Image (cartoon, rainbow, N blue to C red):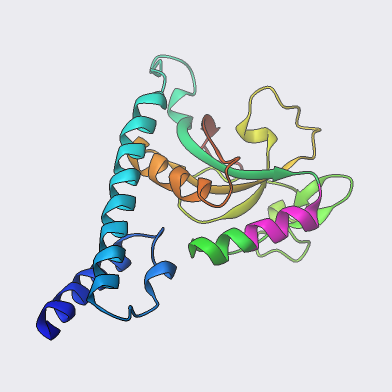
Amino acid sequence: MLYRSLSIFCILLVACQSSETTTEALLTIPKDSSDFKVQNELVVQLNREDSLLMESELLQVPDFPEKNSDEIGADMRQNYYVIIADTASNFDTISRRMERLHLLTKIPKAGEQFIYDPKDGLIMPIDSLDEMFSGSYIERRYKGEDLSLEMLHPYIDDISNKDLTMAIIAGLYLDKKEAVKRWITTRKYFPQSQIVISEMYIGCLN
């Protein structure tokens, strides 16, 4: 019986490492082997649900639209799957929500952070290492999985660049499957999370 309990415990530890949804639930050591069995079945069930959800969402999220390679400047623009975890017009509110998402998911935050200006929204600090863009806003334009605070308007076509709504961006992806995986993760804590396709300018800004 002891050997069987230890074997099941090892299986649980592996499952715990591979499932974000069950890590905290499995940190408590069960009292006996029957508890191991119940928790192990829970891990299998949750993993199966995530797998089914992934298949369902992949069917619903569209592929990138075809790009016209003959169009002038086409090579300077790139489509991304953008994960918008949350939005708000209040800087303190959206900052607290991003910190909460970071703590819950362990998704790293982007390096240099913007500061908030009541008239312009998010801007680069005046003492930024990038002197050319200090005091102005340059949206995130390249693929990456970090969390960052951004202005919402560069990612949504029908929003004016005068709109000061801010967004928690939880990744820019070229791969749809990886994007949907991140979307499922953020939705566990922020049900309002969205995935959108945004065409970004990736050319030189100098």
Which quadrant of the view contains residue 124?
bottom right
From the viewer's perspective, tell me whether residue 100 is left or right of residue 12: right
Q: Where is the N terminus found, in terms of image quarters?
A: bottom left
172 up-or-down from 197: above or below:
below
Residue at screen point 29% across, 64% down: 38
From the viewer's perspective, tell me whether residue 70 is left or right of residue 122: left
> How far across and how far down the image is residue 25, in percent?
42, 68
Residue furthest bottom as drawn: 2
Q: What's the magenta bit mostly, secondary-structure-wise?
A: helix
62 up-or-down from 45: above or below:
above
> How far across and how far down the image is residue 172, in percent?
48, 43
Residue at screen point 49% across, 65% down: 106
**Which residues, given as a range, are shown in magenta?**
90-99
Along the viewing direction, whichever of 6 and 102 lies nearer the viewer = 6
Along the viewing direction, whichever of 140 and 126 lies nearer the viewer = 140
Which quadrant of the view contains residue 10?
bottom left
Q: Is residue 83 visible?
A: yes
